[in-house]
């Protein structure tokens, strides 16, 4: 038996040794074979697919792909992506998902394929959150959002989408506004000027000290109404008090 983290981080030689030691006979049914391999390793099938599929060393191991029933790494990646997007803390625990984000961040945080994959997974989770209030789901979702920004997996397109009015509720649930500012995912002035972010959200991040005072002051001076400027000045004063 091995851990998910071991499978995800193993070298090519270690992966080859792991699969060479699996006592699984030949099966015509690839699905059944993968299930038996996962059981032998003490993992769930989704963990097996994602542990191998997100391990950079697996790219050069066609033999491992074939053992799992896939012609090449591309076919494995397709199955891996489906499992990652649709598994919400069933086969993959939240710790497994955070480990994956860590690997993706090291592979290349600005690679569009990873940002697109993460966005699709997040959208799937949010669709489930709209159907039911589940504390475990909400807790995992909040941890994932933070990890996405901390691992620099949020592309400019991802951030622009998250700043739309449609995501206001979810931004509030996760504290996402502060997170994206703290991690440098969005320029502070660009955040304050974002049309999809409500005035109360902007005042809140200023009050929380997530926007440099000089930037906040510049933005406040650009506001047309005295009442609006006053409310923002109060938020700025509160951050410095």
Image (tube, helix red, strand yellow):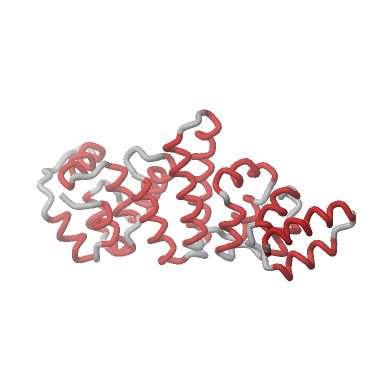
**Depth order, front residue of 239/120:** 239
**168 or 199, which is in the foreground?**
199
Q: Residue 225: x and y, percent?
A: 89, 54
Would you identify the image quadrant in which residue 56 lies? bottom left
Question: Which residue is most to the front?
Answer: 241
Q: Position of residue 213 (x, y in %)?
A: 71, 68
> Looking at the image, which residue is at 68% across and 68% down?
212
**On-image quarter of the C terminus:** bottom right
Location of residue 170 with respect to 58 vertically, above or below: above
* Residue appearing at x 34%, y 44% in the figure: 92
Residue 132's x, y, as percent?
Answer: 50, 29
Q: Position of residue 101 (x, y in %)?
A: 42, 56
Residue 159 left/right relative to 83: right
The quadrant in which residue 100 appears is bottom left
In this view, which residue lies farthest toward the top? 131
Left-right relation of 124 to 61: right
Residue placed most toward the observer, 119 or 149: 149
- Residue depicted at x 71% and y 50%: 197
Look at the picture and state if 136 lies above or below 202: above
Left or right of 216? Residue 159 is: left
């Amino acid at each position: 038996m091995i851990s998910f983290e071991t499978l995800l981080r193993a070298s090519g030689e270690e992966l080859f040794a792991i699969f060479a030691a699996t006592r699984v006979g030949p099966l015509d049914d690839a699905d059944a074979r993968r299930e038996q391999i996962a059981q032998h390793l003490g993992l769930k099938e989704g963990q097996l697919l994602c542990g191998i599929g997100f391990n950079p060393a697996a790219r050069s191991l066609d033999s491992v792909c074939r053992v799992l029933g896939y012609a090449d790494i591309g076919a494995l990646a397709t199955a891996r992506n489906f499992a990652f997007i649709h598994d919400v803390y069933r086969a993959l625990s939240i710790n497994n998902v955070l480990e994956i984000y860590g690997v993706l961040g090291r592979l290349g945080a600005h690679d569009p394929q990873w940002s697109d994959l993460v966005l699709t997974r997040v959208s799937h989770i949010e669709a489930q959150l709209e159907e039911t209030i589940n504390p475990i789901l909400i807790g995992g979702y909040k941890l994932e959002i933070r990890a996405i920004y901390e691992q620099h997996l949020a592309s400019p397109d991802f951030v622009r989408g998250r700043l739309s009015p449609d995501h206001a509720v979810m931004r509030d649930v996760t504290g996402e506004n502060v997170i994206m500012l703290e991690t440098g995912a969005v320029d502070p002035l660009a955040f304050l000027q974002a049309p999809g972010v409500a005035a109360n959200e902007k005042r809140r991040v200023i009050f929380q000290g997530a926007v440099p005072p000089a930037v906040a002051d510049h933005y406040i001076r650009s506001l047309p109404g005295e009442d609006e400027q006053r409310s923002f000045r109060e938020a700025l004063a509160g951050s410095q008090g």
